[in-house]
């Protein structure tokens, strides 16, 4: 039995051309695996670049949003102050109108 194994090993020895001819199916498979690996690595690198670019954009948007929020708060404060001033002016106008009306009545009473 040992002789058969040794003799089979000697028969298995193939020339390079015969080996390539016998394993011709392996070449496209290996090429496909290499191409798939390269494509996958390139895709991951592109995704990483996209993520980094989007992070920078988000940081800028957050900064701009904070500036706009501050301006909006300032505008709301100024609007509240303007509304309070307007309300005060309306109250003063009513008081002045009432005083003028009272003086008009007093003048009518004096003229009688």
Image (spheres, helix red, strand yellow):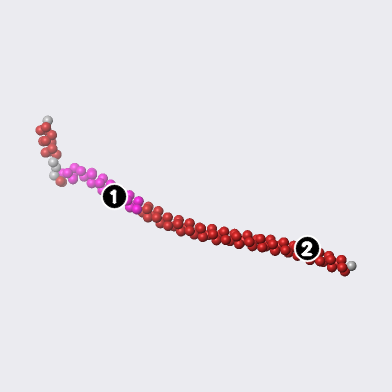
Q: Residue 101, relative to residue 32: is it above or below?
A: below
Name the outermost residue toward the right. Answer: 112
Instruction: Let me know if residue 19 is in the magenta part.
Output: yes
Residue 14: horizontal and vertical position, in percent? 14, 42
Q: Residues within 10 Å of mark 1 (few under 14, many from 20)?
A: few
Q: Quadrant of the C terminus?
A: bottom right
Q: Are marks 1 and 2 in contact (CB under 8 Å)?
A: no
Q: Residue 86, relative to residue 18: is it above or below?
A: below
Instruction: Let me know if residue 85 is in the magenta part.
Output: no
Number of numbered labels in the structure image: 2
Q: Is residue 19 left or right of residue 91?
A: left
Look at 48% across and 58% down and name the residue there: 63
Q: Is residue 21 left or right of residue 70?
A: left
Residue designated by label 2: 98
Q: Secondary structure at mark 1?
A: helix
The tag on residue 35 is: 1
Report the span colored magenta. 18-45
Q: Quadrant of the N terminus?
A: top left
Using the numbered discs, state the Cα–Cα distance from disc 1 to disc 2 in whole angstroms: 92 Å
Residue 46: horizontal and vertical position, in percent? 36, 54
Q: Residues within 10 Å of mark 2 (few under 14, many from 20)?
A: few
Q: Nearer the viewer, residue 112 or 6?
A: 112
Closer to the eye: label 1 or 2: 2
Q: Is residue 64 left or right of residue 106?
A: left
The tag on residue 66 is: none
Look at 81% across and 66% down and name the residue there: 103
Q: Main secondary structure of the magenta part?
A: helix
Q: Nearer the viewer, residue 65 or 31?
A: 65
């Amino acid at each position: 039995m040992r002789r058969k194994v040794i003799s089979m090993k000697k028969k298995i020895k193939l020339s390079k051309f015969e080996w390539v001819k016998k394993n011709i199916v392996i070449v496209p498979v290996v090429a496909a695996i290499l191409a798939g690996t390269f494509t996958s690595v390139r895709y991951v690198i592109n995704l990483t670049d996209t993520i980094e670019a989007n992070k920078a954009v988000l940081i800028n948007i957050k900064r701009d949003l904070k500036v706009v929020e501050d301006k909006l708060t300032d505008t709301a404060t100024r609007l509240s102050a303007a509304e309070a001033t307007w309300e005060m002016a309306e109250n003063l106008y009513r008081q002045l109108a009432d005083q003028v009306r009272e003086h008009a009545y007093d003048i009518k009473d004096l003229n009688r």
